[in-house]
Each structure stands twice: as C-alpha cells, then as structure tokens.
Amino acid sequence: MTVAVGRVTLEHPVVNGSGTLDALAAEAAGLHVAAELAAVVTKTVTPLPRAGNPPPRIAETPAGMLNSIGLANPGIDAFRSTVLPRMRALGRPLVVSIGGFAPNQYASLAAALRDEDGIVALELNVSCPNVESGCLSIGSDPNETRSVTARCAEAAGDLPVWVKLSPNVADVGVMARAAEEGGADALVAVNTLRGAAFDRASGAPLLGGPGGGLSGPAVRPVALSAVAACRAATSLPIVGSGGVGSGQDALAFLDAGASAVAVGTAAFREPLLARRVREELAGLLAAGAGRPSRAESRARSAQPSTAA
Amino acid sequence: VIAVVTRVEPVGPYWLVALERTFDHGEPGRFHMLRAVDGEAFLGRPLSALAVRSDEVEYLLDVRGPGLAALLRVGAAVDVQGPFGRGFDLGAAGDRPVLCAGGIGIAVMPWVAERLPQGRLVAGFRDRTAAAAAGLVPAARAEVVVEPRLVTAPLDAALDEASAVLACGPDPMLQAVAALCGARGVPCQVALEAPMACGYGACYGCAVQLDGRWQRLCIEGPVVDGRRLLAAPVAA
C-alpha cells in the first residue's frame, strides 16, 4: 500500500491530522498509535510557547465537535530540545506542523527544523481558525499563501513543504494553486470548518476561545469537495482530511483525488482507528475492480517529474 | 471494548448504571470514556467508576444530555475506552482519611471507601433528594449537609483529626477544599472534572488550571494534589 506524497514515500496511506494526537501521551497510556501511522504529524509548533485558549475548549455537536484549543504548544525551542528527541524515538517518519502569526515566523521555524533528523516534511498550518490573528488570514489570501510557502520552501532546504488548507475560503482551488506556485510539495485538505455553538440555558458561547473549528463526520462532504477542487486546480498530491472514520471514508477521499488520508476526530473515540482504516481500505482496494490502479496512478501522477 | 449495560437504577436525581465487567476497571479515581454504540453522541464521556463488583462495574451519572442519557438502557452496548489518567493515591491517605464529596462528586467515593475502611465521609448536596446518594458510600462515619450549608463546614471540623482529604465535586468546592486543607496543613487529593473528547492526551480539550497554567486533566489527573489548584496564574 506504499504511496508517494510528493517526495515523501509512505508505507501506507493513513496518517494523523495535526493537533489530533499526542503520540507520546498515547504511548504513555499504553496506546501504540504511532506504529499504526505511515507518518506521525505533530501538533502545530509556534515560535513561542502558547498556553492555549481558556476552557471550555471543546463542545460536541451533531456528528462531530467544535474545538478552540488555540495552538497550545511548548514553542520551537522546547519542541526541539525536549519533544522532538522523544518523537524521533518512536521510530516513525515525522511531519512537523508549523504555525505563526506573520510570514517571517513560518520561515524561521522552517529554518530551525531543516536539519533535524527524522523529519520527512513540514506542514504549514495557515488555516487555524481559533487564534486572534495571523494563521488563517494568511491561508485566506492567495498572495500571502504563495509568499509564505515560497519562503518556507527556501528556508526548509531539501525538506518537503506541505500546506494545510482551510475550508473557510470562497475557492480552495485558488489557495491550492497559490501553494503550488509557492513551491509546495503537497497539500493537506482540509483544516476545521469555522463553527460556533451556544448554551441552551444561558445563551453564552459554548467555547471559551475567540473562534471554533468543526470536525468529525459533519465536515466530510465539505472536505471531499475541497479535495476535489484542489485536484482540479493543481497536480500536487493531496492528503485528505475531514471526518475519516472508516476505510470506506478513506476510499472516498482517494476517489476525490487524495493520495493519502489523515484521521483525527474519530480517533478521539477510537485510538487505534488508523489501523482499522488502513485494513479496511486495503480490503476495499483489493476487492474493488479498477480501484487499486486508480489510486496508484493518482499517487504516481502526483509525483513531481523531477523527484529524486 | 464493548460492555453491555446490566442494571440501571435511580439514586435520587442521579442514575446508577452497571456494565458487565468485560474490561480493565482500573483504580479508584481513574476514568473510562463511555459511549453508547447506538446513541447519537459521537464522542465518549469521561466517567470514574463508583464501585467494582465481581461481574459488574458501576457508575453514577448526573444526566444532562444525550451522551449520558443513551447509557440508561439495560442491554445497551457501550464502547469502553481506558482506564485512563491518574487516580487517588490511597497509600498516601494515612490512617484517618476524610472523603469529601460535593453533588455528583459522590460518584467516586464508594470505591474509595471500600479501599479505605477507616475513612470518614463528609458530603454536601443541593437538596435532600440528591443527598440520598451519600448512602452508596460504605463509610463507618458520615456527615451530610444540604444547601445552604456547604461541605466545607463539616470538613473544617473533621480536619482536626484528618491524615488526608480525598475530595471530588464542583470546581468552586474543590478550590475551597484545597485552600482550607492548605491553610490547615492537611494533604489533599482532589478529583477534577473537565470535558474530554479522547481521554488519552490527544485532543487538548480538558484544560484545567494547575500550577498556574492550563494543563490537560487527562494526563495530570483527574486526581491531583490540591496544592496545584492554589498557584497563581503564570504568563504563558
């Protein structure tokens, strides 16, 4: 089930979505999640430590949930000195998600990570809806997206740069093209869909932070549509993300044009979901006439012709 | 693991739900994520066990929404994840522990009381109907108050001869209990509650203020040293 996502070759098509797994905490809880993933995608790291948003940070909604975590993370210095060595010890390929509030912050993060061992790609989070400024405003503007991607691609040296796109734009294909023009190796589509909920009794917002992001099965059709739009707009390989909870769901993302999928919210309730998705997908691809070659040809055609 | 609901009984305004014991029940104060397979809730709900019987694990529920309501049916299939988190340090409770519960916080105490037969219960409830739940705790000695009396009143008196306090209840109560124990120099373990999507550190949803900063309750707790609630907030 090997798939190529640009210059990165994955053992199989199932990774985790950024911000939906602390692989180290899972191991400590006796859940060997990392071993089930073709690559472990980190929670977004920012230049400085962030405490995250005040609670409540999550609220269940029909067929999914809202979150407003606020990019809680230890900052790039502590990430490199403390987190990364332990992540490396998991023995899985790492994709490090980076986020900032101004274009130069992304480039400096890329430069800080380019020579670290064990990292197979950087993922630019230009699509977090839960912080006051920066992030999503970059991902909502094609010029900013192109420019940030280009600066990161340069700063990252040989490290491939993936761009995680937001569904909170009028035309995600425009952003996909901008990322491609900026030199992205791959797209990750999509981040959470902006959402809100209010307490029935008090009328107060159910989340404590400045924004909210919807995830889970509720967003799957939105994500599939975004993947199809990216497929039509660019030739970049796509990691599909949004409501994947089964091999059938994963297959739908491959049909929409993705080369791989990321699991997230559904893994909150089923920690080893990635294994089930991989096994079910393998069964479906083996059973479905034409489907394996279709998925594989997509993965092949998505590889840049200049790939080493 | 899937476990079937074997018993559902009202206890005052709460519900006792027993699951067949097909899973690792953990230790007092640790928790499971429970989700009715056929319910409309997408995510599990974090619950610490009330007691463990030879063939059942019991929970006490304060049902506020569809996630828990779906568990109130004998025969319902329940997806159980866990046990997760850190429970009570029963070895540190000493020879005169005080079990201090507020409202649905009583839900963790029966199992604690079974393991600490020398324990004394002080409990507070919103009314006499809810106070019926104190009867689930097999403590040799119990004082139960209802609002407007607060549990901190009998607790204050009980601290004179307490080796430790093990507390569970709403946040303002636990804050007051931690402050009181801190002032009196009595070791205090508090079992906190927070909304959780996962229970294993992945979602970052269960942030609580510990040592002055937001931390994940599923990793740090849900039972933590009461002194960790008392630190002043530190800038990130």
Image (spheres, rainbow, N blue to C red):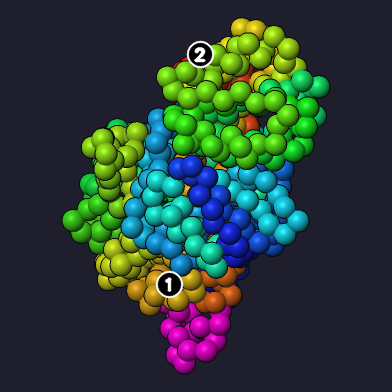
Residue A241 lies, in percent from the top left, at 41, 61
Q: Residue at x 29, y 63 (%)?
A: A222
How many numbered discs? 2
Prevailing SS of the magenta stretch: helix
Q: Residue furthest top?
A: B183
When the figure is inspected, residue B148 is found, relative to residue B195, above or below; the finding is: above
Residue under label 1: A249
Residue A173 lies, in percent from the top left, at 25, 62
SS at mark 2? loop
Counting other residues with Cα less than 10 Å from the Cα at mark 2, is it few (<14), some (14-19), or many (20 or more)? few
Asked if badges 1 and 2 are on one and the same chain, I answer no
- Amino acid type, residue under disc 2 in the picture: Ala
Q: Residue at x 55, y 34 (%)?
A: B105
Residue A218 lies in what quarter of the image? Answer: bottom left
In the image shown, does B207 or B127 lie closer to the viewer?
B127
Residue B123 lies, in percent from the top left, at 57, 26
The residues colored magenta run A282-302
Q: Nearer the viewer, mark 1 or mark 2?
A: 2
Q: Determine the chain carrying the residue at label 1.
A: A
When the figure is inspected, residue B219 is found, relative to residue A241, above or below; the finding is: above
Residue B75 lies in what quarter of the image? Answer: bottom right
